[in-house]
Amino acid sequence: MDTQLTAARKVTNHLLRKYDRTRENAEQRDINKEAYFGQRPKHSAKIEREITKLWKEYCPLTTEAELGIDWHQ
């Protein structure tokens, strides 16, 4: 697994836990909320890029028969 993806997941999960734990101080909760919701799209984008990259590596290596695809039906 990609170490950058792992690091991004850990940061995102840390920010979520920090946001969830903050209950008393509304000001700090808003700050933590903004931090988490700012990080989440970045993490999702990294996941999408990684999935696309892996498929681009995988698809040329396989044949249609191996994938179970019959394009001429």
Image (cartoon, rainbow, N blue to C red):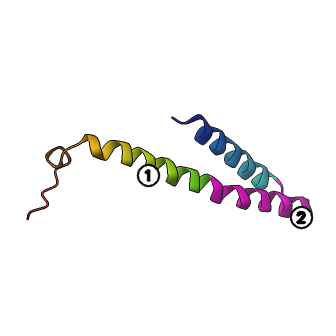
Q: Residue at x 37, y 48 (%)?
A: 56
Residue underneath mark 1: 52
Q: Residues within 10 Å of mark 2 (few under 14, many from 20)?
A: few
Tell me residue 7's x, y (percent): 65, 39
Residue underneath mark 2: 26
Helix or strand or loop: what does disc 1 sit on?
helix
Q: Say which amino acid is labelled 1.
A: Thr
| The C terminus sits in image quarter | bottom left
Q: Nearer the viewer, mark 1 or mark 2?
A: 1
Tell me residue 45's x, y (percent): 57, 56
Q: Residue at x 60, y 38 (%)?
A: 6
Q: Is residue 55 left or right of residue 30?
A: left
Q: Say which amino acid is labelled 2.
A: Ala
Q: Residues within 10 Å of mark 1 (few under 14, many from 20)?
A: few
Characterize the magenta stretch by its predominant secondary structure. helix
Q: What is the distance, in whole Å, between disc 1 and disc 2 at their CAs?
A: 39 Å
Helix or strand or loop: what does disc 2 sit on?
helix
Residue stretch in magenta: 22-42
